[in-house]
Amino acid sequence: MFNQKLLDEIGAKVNEVIAASPAKDVEKNVRAMLSGLFSKMDLVTREEFDVQKEVLLRTREKLTALEARIAELEKGARPQE
């Protein structure tokens, strides 16, 4: 749809205009304010989140396997009628 080169050029021009205007100072102040706010919150990085997600996935797989194993052992330990 859109030419990537045209979009890159527009982005570069917008960045030039912002860099030469008071908006750049506003951006810096907003970033500093948000950074301070985020540091007070208990947030994790995407990398940390992805690592914990993988750990949880492996743990669930092990739990499922152990539950199946216990069920098989219980089935074998029941007294024969």
Image (tube, grey):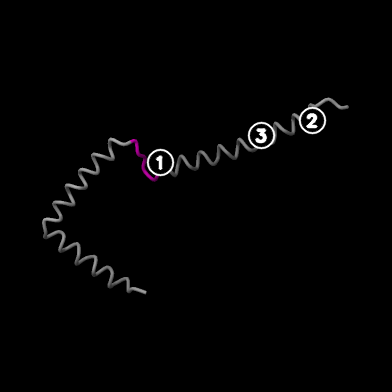
Q: Which of marks 3 and 1 is nearer the N terminus?
A: 1
Question: How far apart, in angstroms, are the residues tagged by discs 3 and 2?
Answer: 14 Å
Label 1: few (<14), some or many (≥20) within 10 Å? Answer: few
Residue under label 1, please give it. Answer: 48
The image position of residue 57, as x and y in percent, is 54, 41
From the viewer's perspective, tell me whether residue 21 is left or right of residue 7: left
Label 3: few (<14), some or many (≥20) within 10 Å? Answer: few
Question: How far apart, in angstroms, are the residues tagged by discs 2 and 1?
Answer: 42 Å
Element type where label 3 sits in the image: helix
**Which mark is in front, 3 or 1?**
3
Q: In this view, does 15 lie above or below 34?
A: below
Q: Residue drawn 33% across and 73% down?
A: 2
Q: What stretch is highlighted in magenta?
A: 42-48
Element type where label 2 sits in the image: helix
Element type where label 1 sits in the image: helix
From the viewer's perspective, tell me whether residue 57 is left or right of residue 23: right
Outermost residue on the top side: it is: 79
Residue under label 3, please give it. Answer: 67
Q: In this view, does 40 lie above or below 19?
A: above
